[in-house]
Image: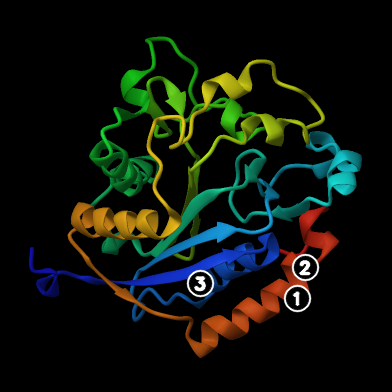
Amino acid sequence: MNLSAFPTWRLIDTGCLDAYSNMAMDEALLRSFDTSTSLPILRLYGWEPAALSLGKFQRVDEVLNLQRCQDDGVQIVRRITGGGVIYHADELTYSIVCSPGQIPPASSIKDSFRILTRFLLEFYRRRGLDAQHALDVMPSGSRLGERTDFCFAGRESYDILISGKKIGGNAQRRCREIIFQHGSIPLTNHATKGMTYMRKQLSGCEQGVVSLVECGSVPDREQLYGEIASVFSSSFAVELVRDILSPVELRHFNRFKCSKYGTNRWNMEGAGE
């Protein structure tokens, strides 16, 4: 396929960063995006050290065992997207920043989840895994979209399931006619570890999730990044061009990291949006 004839997206690979840098980076890319002039973005990254991220609207004292988090020295960061707590360890995370006109037409915001997660379905399927959206395989009458404190305990319509088990998670936000979405591809299963930091223990939650290693798929990180980029290009018929942060994006990143994601006011209280 000759990609030169296809729309161009920026591919920004920032490697493994700490929790505060990762969320500051995502928001910097979102806030710098201009719907009339900016190229759409696919960012790939990881988390080092492992960390917990809260959904935007969660109350930290209600969902996390803060003493346990403090004892283990686990970083806690608040996302700009909703949903439940996620324990990030040994995973590939992606984020997408684009305008609605830069992706195939969606009938609704919910339908855009289907469109923007189809590259993940293709990635898993190329690895020989039977990946499906939850909406397409859950038994009739199943409850989808129920709010849970721990991300991996719930099922959304366009969560991805492999053999009935949830793999990764995805969340989206709309801002000034801009789509922002991020999600994870777990290499190994850390749901049990993540649950130890929750105030309320959800019995059996860890049995409902799966990782690439458990599926018999063991890529190294560089191979994984390359495969994701290749699948994304073919799924959306776009050309990915490697890029770095612009000066504007870098300024936003430094500001958000210091004044927002590096503060308890945002991470613990959710104040300072």
Above or below residue 174? Residue 71 is above
Q: Which residue is depicted at the point 61% across and 47% down?
A: 89
Q: Looking at the image, tell me whether mark 3 or mark 2 is earlier in sequence order.
A: 3
Q: Which mark is residue 262?
A: 2
Q: Which mark is residue 31?
A: none
Q: Are marks 2 and 1 in contact (CB under 8 Å)?
A: yes
Regarding mark 1 in the picture, which secondary structure is present there? Answer: helix
Please state the total of marks drawn on the protein image. Answer: 3
Above or below residue 249? Residue 191 is above
Q: Which residue is depicted at the point 50% across and 40% down?
A: 169
Regarding mark 2 in the picture, which secondary structure is present there? Answer: loop
Q: Looking at the image, tell me whether mark 3 or mark 1 is earlier in sequence order.
A: 3
Residue 103 image offset from top left, x and y in percent: 27, 58
Q: Disc 3 marks which amino acid?
A: Leu
Mark 2 to mark 1: distance in Å?
5 Å
Q: Which mark is residue 258?
A: 1
On the image, numbered disc 3 is attached to which residue?
A: 29
Q: Which residue is depicted at the point 42% across and 71% down?
A: 12
Mark 3 to mark 2: distance in Å?
17 Å
Is residue 195 at least partly visible in the picture? yes
Label 1 crowding class (10 Å Cα cut-off): few <14, some 14-19, many 20+? few
Is residue 180 at least partly visible in the picture? no
Above or below residue 129? Residue 256 is below
